[in-house]
């Protein structure tokens, strides 16, 4: 069912022009990522001449793999953001702590924040909590020792 177009300020606090600017950013980035994916040269795990060669090859393989999964993650985030734009829920904060701490959270994501990171799903207030959690997780990850590679 076609919805009536609302002019000016949308319900998510962003103007139609702002949403369009962000949408273009997302579309351009998505195109770039898809091009990258299409042009990617696969890294083969082949027969190795020696152990050093094998180690190097495996490093490359895992680098390529992590790069690819990061790219896929980003594509997913961009697709989801474009979906939210289509559903007119874009720019609305999805912070997990909304109900716990609704006093500070307006429920809207600031335009400046979206401009810097158009896939954002949380406002400045909620991202602070998220960042702290991510930092803690990253610290836990980096302190983990990979056995057998020394
Ligand atoms: Zn929020």
Image (cartoon, rainbow, N blue to C red):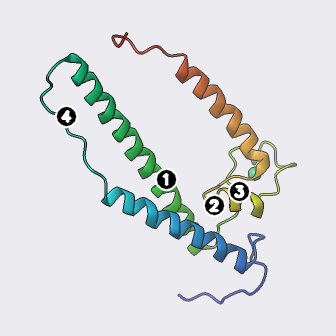
Mark 3 vs mark 2, CA separation in Å: 12 Å
Tell me the SS state at disc 3.
loop
The earlier-in-sequence mark between 4 and 3 is: 4
For disc 2, the marked residue is: 118
Mark 4 vs mark 3, CA separation in Å: 43 Å
Quadrant of residue 147 in the image?
Answer: top left
Decide: marks 1, 4 in contact (CB < 8 A)?
no
The earlier-in-sequence mark between 4 and 2 is: 4
Tell me the SS state at disc 4.
loop
- The quadrant of the picture occupied by the C terminus is top left
> Marks 3 and 1: which is nearer the front?
1
Report x, y in % for residue 24.
Answer: 58, 73
Mark 3 vs mark 1, CA separation in Å: 19 Å
Residue at the image point whose x is 68% and y is 45% from the top: 96
Report x, y in % for residue 27.
Answer: 52, 70
Decide: marks 3, 2 in contact (CB < 8 A)?
no
Q: Is residue 108 visible?
A: no
The earlier-in-sequence mark between 3 and 1 is: 1
For disc 4, the marked residue is: 45
- Residues 36 and 27: in front is 36
For disc 3, the marked residue is: 93
Mark 1 vs mark 2, CA separation in Å: 11 Å
Which label number is shown at residue 74?
1
Quadrant of residue 67 in the image?
Answer: top left
Does the beta carbon at disc 3 come under 8 Å from ligand 1?
Answer: yes
Q: Is residue 44 left or right of residue 10?
A: left
């Amino acid at each position: 069912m076609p919805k009536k177009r609302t002019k000016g300020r949308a319900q998510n606090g962003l103007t139609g022009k702002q949403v369009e600017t962000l949408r273009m950013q997302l579309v351009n980035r998505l195109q770039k990522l898809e091009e990258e994916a299409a042009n990617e040269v696969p890294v083969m795990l082949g027969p190795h001449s020696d152990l050093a060669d094998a180690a190097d090859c495996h490093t490359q393989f895992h680098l390529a793999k992590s790069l690819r999964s990061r790219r896929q993650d980003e594509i997913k985030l961009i697709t989801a953001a474009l979906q939210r734009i289509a559903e007119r829920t874009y720019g609305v904060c999805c912070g997990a702590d909304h109900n716990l701490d609704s006093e500070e959270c307006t429920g809207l994501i600031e335009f400046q924040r979206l401009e810097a990171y158009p896939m954002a799903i949380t406002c400045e207030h909620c991202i602070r909590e998220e960042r702290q959690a991510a930092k803690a997780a990253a610290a836990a990850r980096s302190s983990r020792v990979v056995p057998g590679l020394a």
